[in-house]
Image (cartoon, rainbow, N blue to C red):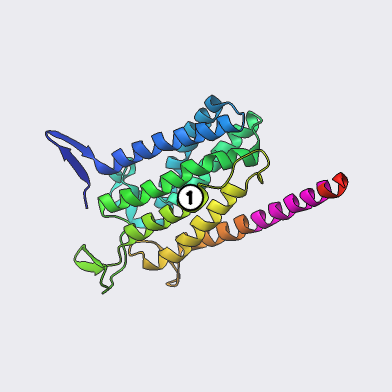
Amino acid sequence: MLPILSIGRLSIQTSGLIAILAIWIGFGQIERYAKRRGLNPDTYSTMIMIALIAGVIGARVAYVVQNANFWQDLTAFVSISPTMFDPLSGVLVGLLAAFIYGSRKKLPFWISLDLFTPGLAVWMIALGLMHLANGDSFGSPAQLPWSIYLYGAWRHPQQIYETAAALIIAVFIWPLKQQKDAIAGARFLLFSLLSAFARLFLEYFHGDSAVIGGMIRSAQVTSLLIVIVSGSLLLWKTKQYEAGEQKFSEESE
């Protein structure tokens, strides 16, 4: 684990550096796809800033709700450590804020979500790396050849699992075309479906997440809802697209 990166006399919080790089790369990708779709990148830059601020606040509030022991140290409220954020809730709140802003600006809803997807993919990779650097979001005890020794026990390398899953999803999502004839929203919905499914599975190896009724983890409940909603919407939009293509083909004959 490397919470602090030291370069000579300069010391930098590793997770903060990773977050800044992720935001910078994400901004660039979103602006690139906005230009490709003939949309104003400045408008989307403003939307991103609003979504980021709302997402950070939402992720922290969700963490507070899920962890009663948070109140034992109120100074932790201003910490930027990724262990004190609920990432899925943060993404949902950020998207809600972006939706409100986009509605006021009359931006195309599904296309806007597709534009956000590359940035979200970068952020999920960065989140796993931040957890790895800080040693938080650790795994449950396990005696495996690839276990890591952390906090007095051999554990699942949960942070590496999360980073690897995010990388695989990003590699799968990245090549999907974003031309004007693409299914609007498909890229975002597929990303949401895969990310939530991965979280649903990986939560079984978590060693520090909240458990409901001694059986299911709170993050799994959120993930399951996202899987159902995003999967249903993706199926519906695909059928709509295919029906439109078939109608166009019949009219052309």
Query: Looking at this view, is 110 or 82 the one in front?
Result: 110
Splitting the image into 4 quarters, where does residue 68 fall?
bottom left
User: Residue at left 46%, top 50%?
Assistant: 170
Name the spot of residue 201 as percent of width and height, x first. Answer: 45, 66
Query: Looking at this view, is 172 or 115 the one in front?
Result: 172
Splitting the image into 4 quarters, where does residue 15 fall?
top left
User: Residue at left 12%, top 33%?
Assistant: 9
Question: In the shown orientation, is residue 13 left or right of residue 40?
Answer: left
Query: Looking at this view, is 86 or 37 the one in front?
Result: 37
Name the spot of residue 52 as percent of width and height, x first. Answer: 45, 37
Q: State the SS at label 1.
A: helix
Query: Looking at this view, is 1 or 101 the one in front?
Result: 1
Name the spot of residue 29 as percent of width and height, x first. Answer: 48, 36
Residue that label 1 marks: 89
User: Residue at left 67%, top 57%?
Assistant: 235
Residue farthest toward the front in the current orientation of the protein: 253
Main secondary-structure element of the magenta-colored stretch: helix
Name the amino acid type tagged 1. Ser
Splitting the image into 4 quarters, where does residue 77 fall?
top left
Label 1: few (<14), some or many (≥20) within 10 Å?
many
Question: Magenta stretch?
Answer: 232-248
Would residue 71 be seen by someone viewing this image from the given angle? no
Is residue 245 one of those drawn in magenta? yes
Is residue 34 one of those drawn in magenta? no
Name the spot of residue 151 as percent of width and height, x first. Answer: 21, 62
